[in-house]
Image (cartoon, grey):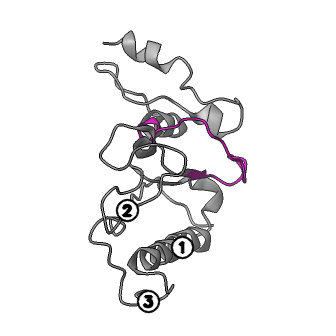
Amino acid sequence: MRSWEPFCAYVSYSMVHMPVLPHPDFAGKTGNGDWADVLAEMDYRTGQILDAIHDAGIDDNTIVVFCSDNGPEGTDPWLGDSGPWRGTYFTAMEASLRAPFIIRWPGKIPAGRVSNEIVHIVDMYPTLARVAGAKLPTDRPVDGIDQLGFFLGKQENSNREGFPAYVADRL
């Protein structure tokens, strides 16, 4: 196996935002319109990234996070479905904030585990800092909570229990 220096690759798929336009190779692929074609392309491109990680032989030493920053769009013609939750993109309601979050670290994070616990993308800063052995700054408040124990399956609940009190203490 090749020796690798630590790195971070941040891939932000903006193509699911308006205007929703798939690459020509994916246009019409699903038969369900541009939105579905874009999702098919995003799935394919994510697969290419995972394949590259595998081909490089660094699967077991690579954390992959797949998440969104907001819920469904609330305007036509891109109106999305938030299931049982109320709200859409650009609101402070639960459906705007409740979004997919998938984390993969083979051999460390249990595969196939599903949770309805609250984890936020800002939690990745203190969590990944801990994984890397980095110290968080002490001269300012840090937004986010270390979720490593929860991700590793060593605790049943995320660290969000009591979070409002934690925030109130710092205001």
Residue in the picture at 34% in, 55% down: 74
For label 2, the crowd category at 10 Å Cα-Cα, with few meaning under 14, some 14 to 19 and many 20 or more, is few
Q: Earlier in the sequence, mark 2 or mark 3?
A: 3
Q: What secondary structure characterizes most of the magenta part?
A: loop
Disc 2 to disc 3, C-alpha distance: 20 Å
- Location of the C terminus (image quadrant): top left
Q: Would you name the residue on which mark 3 appears?
A: 28
Q: Position of residue 149 (x, y in %)?
A: 64, 32
User: Which mark, residue 79?
Assistant: 2
Task: Say above or below: 140 vs 125.
Answer: above
Say which of marks 1 and 2 sits in front.
2
Mark positioned earlier in the residue sequence (1 or 3): 3
Which of discs 1 and 3 lies nearer the camera? The answer is 3
Closer-to-camera residue (9/120): 120
What residue is pinned by disc 1?
52
How far apart in space, not on screen, are marks 1 and 2 (Cα)?
Answer: 34 Å
